[in-house]
Each structure stands twice: as C-alpha cells, then as structure tokens.
Amino acid sequence: MDHRTRLQMILADTPVGQVLPAIAQLHLPNWWLAGGAVRNTVWRSIFGEECGLFIKDFDIAFFDQTGDRTQELAAKTSLTQQFPDYEFDVKNQASFARWRSGRRPYTSTEDGIQDWLHTATAVGVRLNTQGEWECFAPYGFDDLFNGIIRPTPAHIDDPDAHNKASTFLAKCPHLINS
C-alpha cells in the first residue's frame, strides 16, 4: 500500500474525514488541511492510547493574493457553526507575512506549508472537486509514519521547533526527535 492510500485509510473515519467535505464546500482557493490535526491523528493511530496527542484545531491553509482576513473569518465561522465542538484556524498564506512580522511572503499554499516547523506537520490533505482525496507532503511521508519529529530546513536552528518537539515527546513517548 502506498503512503497516500495509507494516509487516507487512517484519516477517513476520523474527525479529519468528517470535516474535509465541509472545508471543500467553502471553495477556498488552493486549500489544504494540514498540521496537527493530520499529524496527531496519524500518530495516535500508529502509537495508540499511549500517545496523548489529540486534535487541538484544524489548520486550513489557502492562497488568495487579493483576499483579506474576512475570508478567513467567514470560513472559520461557517465551519464552527457546522462543527461547534471543534476549533478551526483558517489562514490565507498570501497575507501571512502582512500580519506575522518577520516572515517572508509566500507564493502559494504549498510554499507556506513547507515552511511550517516540522516535516510531519507539513503534510496536507484535501478533497478535489470530484470528492477524491489529494495529499501534499513536500518532505515525504516517512517522518509522519515513523513518528519522527524533524524540523523543516527553514527551522533547523529555531528554538520554537525545539520547544514544540519537547512538547510532542512529553505527550507521545514513542516519537523520535531527530
């Protein structure tokens, strides 16, 4: 079984699989659900109950050069109304550098995701217009499926990446800090 099929099988019958169709209905340009919702769901599936990492929120990244923060807020409001027990973090990667000082501008959603702190966090899923699953993993799937916490190239010396890795290890002792 290939990594994409394995990822879909793990996520399909989880909260991730429940919210994906609703995100797709928002028609956000070039969107991906990535980050902790994907990572933590996979790690709990692999490492079981001893892994104390849960979905904190659903990180939805999209790219609209002409968009503004109202898109993010409208999407978050819509999803929160449909799923009141979940938290949603919706961010236009085109405007990220405008409100996050010190960050470089991104050229696409994928450009933004590959700049996230860890390789296992920089894995995205979405449904295309035919309802088929698509995956984005700029660093591959090995770190995600092997429980490896590795900073992305931009964050090798970033204390935030190190601190976050320590948090993951404290909650899921089977992980490997690389």
Image (spheres, rainbow, N blue to C red):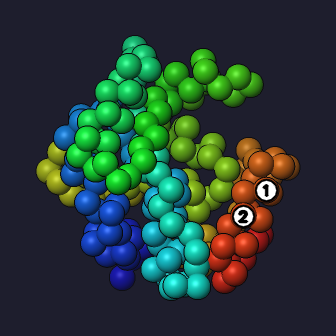
Rounded to the nearest angstrom, the CA distance separating label 2 from label 1 is 6 Å
Where is mark 1, residue-wise?
Answer: 163
Quadrant containing the N terminus in the rendered view: bottom left
Q: Residue at x 73, y 72 (%)?
A: 170
Q: Is residue 93 above or below residue 57?
A: above
Q: Residue at x 66, y 73 (%)?
A: 171
* SS category of the residue bearing label 1: helix
Residue 27 in sight from this viewpoint: yes
* SS category of the residue bearing label 2: helix
Q: Amino acid at mark 2?
A: Thr
Residue 128 in sight from this viewpoint: no
Where is mark 2, residue-wise?
Answer: 167
Instruction: List x then y, in percent, for residue 95.
Output: 52, 22
Instruction: List x then y, in percent, for residue 172.
Output: 65, 77
Q: Is residue 112 above or below residue 162?
A: above
Locate residue 119 relative to residue 26 in the image: left or right: right
Mark 2 Cα-neighbour bin, 10 Å: few <14, some 14–19, many ≥20: few
Q: Is residue 50 above or below residue 93?
A: below
Q: Amino acid at mark 1?
A: Asn
Q: Residue at x 69, y 81 (%)?
A: 173
Q: Residue at x 79, y 56 (%)?
A: 163
Outermost residue, top side = 66
Instruction: List x then y, in percent, for residue 27.
Output: 24, 34
Name the image quarter holding residue 103. Answer: top right
Between 141 and 10, the one nearer to me in the picture:
10
Locate residue 159 relative to residue 91 in the image: left or right: right
Outermost residue, front side = 85
Mark 1 Cα-neighbour bin, 10 Å: few <14, some 14–19, many ≥20: few
Quadrant containing the C terminus in the rendered view: bottom right
- The label on residue 78 is none
Are dots 2 and 1 in contact, CB under 8 Å? yes
